Image: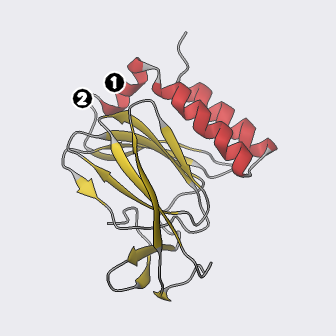
Amino acid sequence: MAYGLDEFCRDSHDTLVRDNSPDGREAVRKNLEKLLLNQAFVEEVCGNDAPVGVTELYRDDELEFVVLAHVNDKPHASPPHDHGTSWAIYGQAKEYTDMSEFSRPDGGDGDGDVKIEHVKTYRLEPGQAGLYDVRAIHAIDYPAQACFVRVTGRPLENEPRLRYDMEAGKASFIANRSAS
């Protein structure tokens, strides 16, 4: 039997109870890649009958982590952003997402005048997942019809996060689901 969403959520819960550190989150990332091998799951959450937009697939009552399906009908590129005190794992299901990572030489985590530096850019292909830990600055760029499954350490609706404007050298707080 294929590894499914229920098993992934149970394994993620058990892993994070034991170890909610970067190592534990890395184990969740690996299990997300295992889940993305399940083509029936991918078709269910990202197929032709899946709703366009963001769909919550699971929310852990105890630990608060959330599993979301992102089905995108249009291309999109986000500005550099972080997830505040949360973390995120992006798992590519269909098409691809170009991920860019940035550093903040001042080591700060507040808004205002800032300088960030591009570190690297790489492509997540179907079946691959990337971990972006607490305050990790990243940007995403994907084509039309891209779909990914994202796990966040907590719901982001009210999580103070930063969006970076590299041209202006500014960081500003955002508190909604999208960093765009």
- Please say if the residues under marks 1 and 2 sit with CB atoms less than 8 Å apart: no
| Residue at far right of view | 18
As drawn, 10 above or below 18 = above
171, above or below 83, in the image: below
Q: Quadrant of residue 118?
A: bottom left
Q: Amino acid at mark 2?
A: Asp
Q: Secondary structure at mark 2?
A: loop
As drawn, the label of residue 49 is 2
Q: Which residue is disc 1 drawn over?
A: 43
Marks 1 and 2 sit apart, C-alpha to C-alpha, by 8 Å
The answer to which quarter of the image holds residue 154 is bottom right
Q: Mark 1 falls on what kind of element? A: helix
Looking at the picture, how far across and down is residue 34, in whole percent? 55, 25
Please, what is the three-letter code of the amino acid marked with disc 1? Answer: Glu
Most extreme residue toward the top is 1
- Name the one closer to the observer, 45 or 106: 106
Q: Residue at x 52, y 64 (%)?
A: 83
* Position of the N terminus by quadrant: top right
Front-most of residues 86 and 57: 86
Q: Position of residue 55 (x, y in %)?
A: 38, 44
